Image (tube, helix red, strand yellow):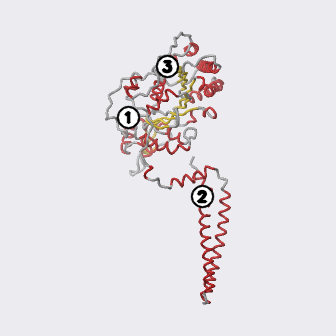
């Protein structure tokens, strides 16, 4: 939190500086009075003696005014000595910023190897996760890659609850509970039974009645949207508290029982995960960004002390600036995560489209009880765990082979990390922005300033103006003609 306005209002730092200045001036006045007294006593000329006495009186008067000012600033400093520790930290921080770093301490920024980090996470990751992934930031590819790597290091069973038709390649279809956008009463009752079944597995493992022979990963896509929809439908709202209690219980106890919960929000704010208090402290966080989808989720994470500790904030911002420059395309995701170890920021391992579609999650089918709930009809599954290779340090080629991917030949002619947005990208960004603020109208320059992906790109303002005019021609947005020839046209959604 930026406390600078608070300190300017308090006047603490200013009073402290004035007090030091007055003290130095008072010492100088006392020295001048002593010197004037000595000189006047040594002089024989009456005129010079009178002049020195007059000067001494003036110095004494100025000294008294300094004494009053010192007392005033002393009281002000004492008044603000109760200012919180953050105030003194900010003062020290501001002083530090004003000092120039020695040249030898400035060097290239070292970023974590994203593939090596996700390999380590595949072996060590056991925590619940809050995933902040706005539209077009690579959520599907990140989740698929992480679960694909994890499923080859240890047996996992992925259960997903979603309402947007998301794909989980390799996960048995009966493991995915697909809700409607407006869930029915039967679906909500089925969801409660599913959560109750997952809780039963966790409780049996906690009571040592069942072995932890695989990791159960429960993914709740757009959890807050689904939960808020349930609360707004009269026939369903009475079930909201029961659903919430199961989620909170699983996040509180599941980690030690081989059950992990992944809460996904298509948002850039941690509050939109729909959990708070002690539950939020049990989550590890991952925020995604891209040039096309923007970096708001990552930047907002800097302001959240639960995600980015204040002591790491400056380092993370340096890593963030360096990581953006290494993104290979406008859709290439940037990852901020503390899945394992301390918080890191890095570009997601780069895969071509043809490589991404080959990723497969080796998920076990759900057990008989969960399958009966998910399908509403019992089915018999063998439930054998796929062979799990021992964790090894692998090169990218070995990992692609391990994931069953046919790698494309590597070329130095990868898309430029500062590549231009395409016309269709610009059209999509302009339309999305105008539709999100449908009651307002904007200049093309205001659209560029408000849309982060356009602001960060090299797209000239003239190109955005031409795209807006093209959308007007296609009757997709409305053009508001300027009042005079010197003004620019404004645009708004249909």
Which residue is the site of mark 2? 13
Q: In this view of the protein, can residue 494 be seen by the observer? A: no
First along the sequence among labels 1 and 3: 3
Q: Is residue 201 left or right of residue 458?
A: right
Which residue is the site of mark 1? 424
Q: Residue at x 65, y 75 (%)?
A: 61
- The answer to whether 3 is drawn above or below residue 378 in the figure is below
Asked which secondary structure carries label 3, the reply is loop
Of 423 and 66, which appears nearest the observer? 66
Asked which secondary structure carries label 1, the reply is helix
Q: Quadrant of residue 249?
A: top right
Q: Residue furthest bottom?
A: 45
Q: Residues within 10 Å of mark 3 (few under 14, many from 20)?
A: many
Report the mark closest to the observer, 1 or 3. 3
Q: Residue at x 47, y 19 (%)?
A: 388
Residue 198 locus on image (x, y percent): 60, 20
Q: Is residue 377 left or right of residue 472?
A: right
Q: Is residue 308 left or right of residue 413?
A: right
Of 5 and 389, which appears nearest the observer? 389
Which residue is the site of mark 3? 363
Q: In this view of the protein, can residue 204 be seen by the observer? A: yes
Give how far apart the Cα atoms at labels 1 and 2 are.
52 Å
First along the sequence among labels 1 and 2: 2
- The answer to whether 368 is drawn above or below residue 9 in the figure is above
């Amino acid at each position: 939190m930026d406390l600078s306005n608070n300190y300017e209002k308090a006047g603490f730092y200013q009073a402290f500086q004035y007090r030091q200045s007055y003290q130095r001036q008072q010492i100088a006045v006392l020295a001048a009075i002593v010197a004037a007294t000595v000189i006047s006593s040594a002089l024989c000329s009456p005129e010079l003696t009178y002049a020195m006495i007059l000067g001494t009186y003036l110095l004494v008067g100025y000294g008294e005014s300094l004494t009053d000012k010192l007392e005033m600033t002393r009281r002000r400093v004492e008044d603000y000595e109760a200012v919180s520790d953050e105030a003194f930290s900010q003062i020290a921080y501001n002083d530090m910023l004003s000092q120039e770093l020695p040249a030898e301490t400035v060097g290239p920024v070292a970023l974590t190897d994203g593939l090596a980090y996700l390999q380590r996470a595949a072996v060590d990751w056991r925590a619940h996760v809050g995933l902040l992934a706005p539209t077009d930031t690579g959520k599907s590819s990140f989740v698929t890659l992480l679960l694909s790597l994890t499923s080859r290091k240890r047996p996992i069973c992925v259960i997903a609850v979603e309402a947007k038709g998301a794909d989980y390649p390799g996960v048995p279809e009966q493991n995915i509970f697909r809700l409607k956008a407006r869930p029915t009463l039967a679906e909500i009752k089925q969801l409660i039974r599913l959560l109750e079944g997952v809780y039963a597995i966790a409780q049996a493992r906690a009571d040592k009645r069942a072995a932890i022979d695989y990791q159960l990963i429960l993914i709740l896509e757009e959890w807050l949207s689904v939960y808020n929809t349930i609360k707004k439908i009269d026939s369903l709202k009475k079930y909201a508290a029961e659903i919430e209690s199961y989620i909170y219980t699983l996040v509180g106890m599941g980690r030690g029982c081989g059950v992990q919960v992944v809460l996904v929000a298509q948002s850039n704010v941690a509050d939109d995960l729909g959990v708070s208090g002690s539950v939020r402290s049990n989550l590890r966080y991952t925020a995604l960004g891209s040039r096309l989808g923007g970096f708001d989720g990552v930047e907002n994470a800097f302001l959240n002390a639960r995600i980015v500790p204040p002591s790491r904030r400056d380092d993370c911002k340096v890593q963030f600036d360096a990581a953006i420059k290494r993104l290979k395309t406008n859709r290439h995701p940037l990852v901020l995560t503390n899945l394992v170890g301390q918080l890191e920021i890095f570009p997601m391992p780069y895969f071509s489209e043809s490589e991404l579609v080959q990723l497969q999650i080796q998920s076990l089918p759900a057990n008989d009880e969960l399958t009966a709930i998910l399908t509403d009809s019992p089915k018999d599954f063998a439930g054998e765990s796929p062979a799990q290779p021992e964790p090894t340090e692998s090169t990218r080629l070995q990992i692609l082979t391990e994931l069953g991917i046919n790698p494309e030949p590597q070329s130095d002619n990868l898309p430029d990390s500062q590549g231009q947005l395409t016309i269709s990208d610009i059209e999509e960004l302009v339309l999305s922005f105008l539709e999100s603020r449908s009651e307002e109208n904007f200049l093309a320059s205001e659209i560029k300033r408000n849309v982060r992906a356009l602001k960060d790109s090299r797209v000239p303002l003239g190109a955005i103006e031409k795209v807006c005019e093209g959308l007007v021609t296609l009757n997709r947005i409305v053009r508001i003609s300027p009042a005079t020839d010197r003004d620019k046209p404004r645009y708004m959604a249909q």
